[in-house]
Image: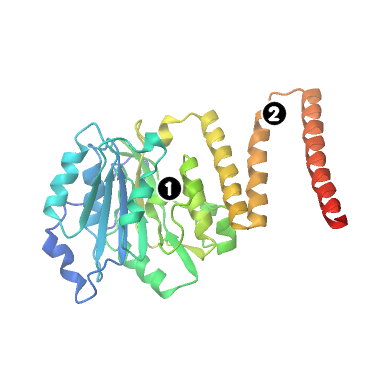
Amino acid sequence: MAIFEVKVGVQAPKPPKPPAESEVISGWGSRSSKPLVSILCHCFNHENFIEDALNSFLMQKTDFPWEIIVHDDASTDNSVAIIKKYAERYPAIIKPIYQEENQYSKGLKPTFFTSQVAKGEFFAFCEGDDYWLDENKLQVQADFLRENPDYAVCGHDAFIFEGDEIIKASKLPEAAKRDVTGARLSRGWFILTLTAMFRSDFDVFPEEHSKILNGDTFLFSRLGKIGGYKYMPELLPGAYRSHAGGIWSLVDEQKRTAHSLNSMFWISQYYRRVGDHKLSVYYAQRSALLALEGTEGMSFLEFAVFQYTLLKQMIRKRAGWLYRLLRARKG
């Protein structure tokens, strides 16, 4: 395993040029041809980045089969040509999906397409503009999940780089660098999607998922219903690229808050639909707290009126519920 220093201001390391397909699969041995892990890679106008991502996948050393499902959402640059070149060199590993029309603009997330064709027992996400650096990542994470059925997901840290330079040594806050239970995971936990590997035997794309811009919180919350999270500091950090074309980079702070409020609302609606009252209420509360951030510019009087109106509406709603309940009992 290569060792390198993650330090702000130094050049970000890159994955090596990949070996031939025959060398990649030589270690798979006599195991079943069905992939144990499916790497889900989503690409849109990543012509300057996608090779780093694919190279980081193809350097993986495992004793089990794995596959790469790479989805291009009608890129207008040279991304498709690059993906086709790799798919031709690695036909047993790379399974491309090419869209003729952009699906994200229609409300369809790439996960909707990649998760349907992926065959792995475990999924590993990495966007086309990020990459990995640990050649044993898939082996270590898959071994852990196979040996520990009480865990649903495992992950590690990543550094942030811009251009060729590391601008932040760790994307994870220190408080997030630990294991958590499934119950805690369901209430939200900061996991870097580009480092995560998780079990695929759950509802990967429920109907509410398409209504949320950033679905990571929703994904990991649902995974908490089937197990906990394992943090793996022994793995080399992944590489998170900061650039103007990133989806989240295009959203200003005010809109991020609006998107987060929207996400909390739909997560609450999901748990309401599946009958988990506690989590539905929890995410409804988080949505309300985010909405209250908009009261910062209010005067004391305006804030008092706002709180009074909110309380009155809540009482009216509860009283109506109580009235219907009493009528039903009388009937």
Q: Could you say where residue 250 lies in the image, as x and y percent from the top left?
A: 41, 30
Write the residue at 55% across / 63% down: 182
Q: Is residue 256 above or below residue 85?
A: above
Write the residue at 51% across / 65% down: 226
Q: Residue furthest front?
A: 331
Q: Considering the image in quadrants, where does the C terminus appear?
A: bottom right
Q: Is residue 27 above or below residue 19?
A: below
Q: Amino acid at mark 2?
A: Thr
* 271 or 182: nearer the viewer: 271
Write the residue at 21% across / 45% down: 51
Residue at label 1? Answer: 170
* 162 or 294: nearer the viewer: 294
Task: Determine whether the residue tagged by mark 1 lies in a helix, strand or loop.
Answer: loop
Answer with left or right where residue 69 lies relative to residue 160. left
For disc 2, the neighbor class at 10 Å (few under 14, some 14 to 19, many from 20) is few
Q: Considering the image in quadrants, where does the N terminus appear?
A: bottom left
Q: Amino acid at mark 1?
A: Ser
